[in-house]
Image (cartoon, rainbow, N blue to C red):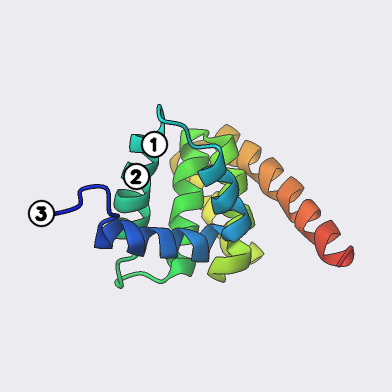
């Protein structure tokens, strides 16, 4: 008999990738806030986004990080932009990478979207710098 409550291989890979990109602290906080209502959603994003897409070998985590930030900026997903800018500490995407991606957003998705994302990135970079100085 198969235990359907056991995590799939894709889920396990997704969780490893999610932790590598977002950090244990972020993932632990998200997991502790999971309820019965959003458990299926958490499983979906862990398997699909992290286990399937982010775990593919064709692009590096740095490249995926740059693409993700640009897409989220274009879509106006502010909280997700901030989260993925923070994740650059783990993915290797540089501030210059993010600046270049947001210049593309300005041309292809609009100046207001890029302007707002730049404001968010600057704020997150200031927070990251302050945290580093406090260490």
Q: Residues within 10 Å of mark 2 (few under 14, many from 20)?
A: some
Q: Nearer the viewer, mark 2 or mark 3?
A: 3
Q: Position of residue 111 (x, y in %)?
A: 57, 37
Is tag 2's residue or tag 3's residue first in the polypeptide sequence?
3
**Please, which residue is most extreme toward the left here?**
1
Q: Is residue 122 left or right of residue 10?
A: right
Q: CB under 8 Å between callouts 2 and 3?
A: no
Q: Which residue is mark 1?
A: 39
Q: Image height check: is 24 above or below 103?
A: below
Residue in the image at 59% along x and 33% along y: 112
Residue receiving disc 2:
43
Identify the image quadrant of residue 95: bottom right
**In terms of image quadrants, where is residue 82?**
top right
Mark 1 touching mark 2, by CB under 8 A? Answer: yes
Residue at the spot of label 3: 1
Q: Give the residue at x 41% y 30%.
A: 36
Distance from disc 1 to disc 2, alpha carbons, whole Å, reads 6 Å
Task: Locate residue 130 relative to residue 69 in the image: left or right.
Answer: right
Give the numbered dot on residue 66.
Answer: none
Q: Residue at x 45, y 68 (%)?
A: 61
Ranked by sequence position, the earlier of labels 3 and 1 is 3
| Label 2 element class | helix
Q: Residue furthest top?
A: 37
Foreground mark, 3 or 1?
3
Q: Position of residue 60 (x, y in %)?
A: 41, 71
Q: Residue furthest front?
A: 1
Q: Residue furthest right?
A: 134
In front of the other: 101 or 80: 80
Q: Quadrant of the N terminus?
A: bottom left
């Amino acid at each position: 008999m198969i235990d359907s409550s056991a995590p799939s291989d894709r889920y396990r890979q997704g969780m490893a990738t999610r932790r590598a990109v977002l950090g244990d602290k972020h993932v632990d906080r998200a997991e502790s806030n999971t309820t019965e209502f959003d458990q299926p959603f958490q499983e979906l994003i862990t398997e699909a986004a992290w286990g399937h897409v982010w775990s593919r070998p064709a692009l590096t985590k740095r490249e995926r990080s740059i693409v993700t930030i640009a897409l989220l900026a274009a879509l106006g997903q502010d909280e997700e932009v901030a989260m993925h800018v923070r994740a650059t500490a783990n993915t290797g995407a540089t501030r210059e990478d993010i600046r270049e991606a947001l210049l593309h957003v300005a041309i292809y998705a609009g100046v207001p979207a890029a302007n707002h994302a730049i404001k968010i990135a600057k704020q997150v970079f200031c927070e990251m710098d302050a945290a580093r100085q406090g260490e």
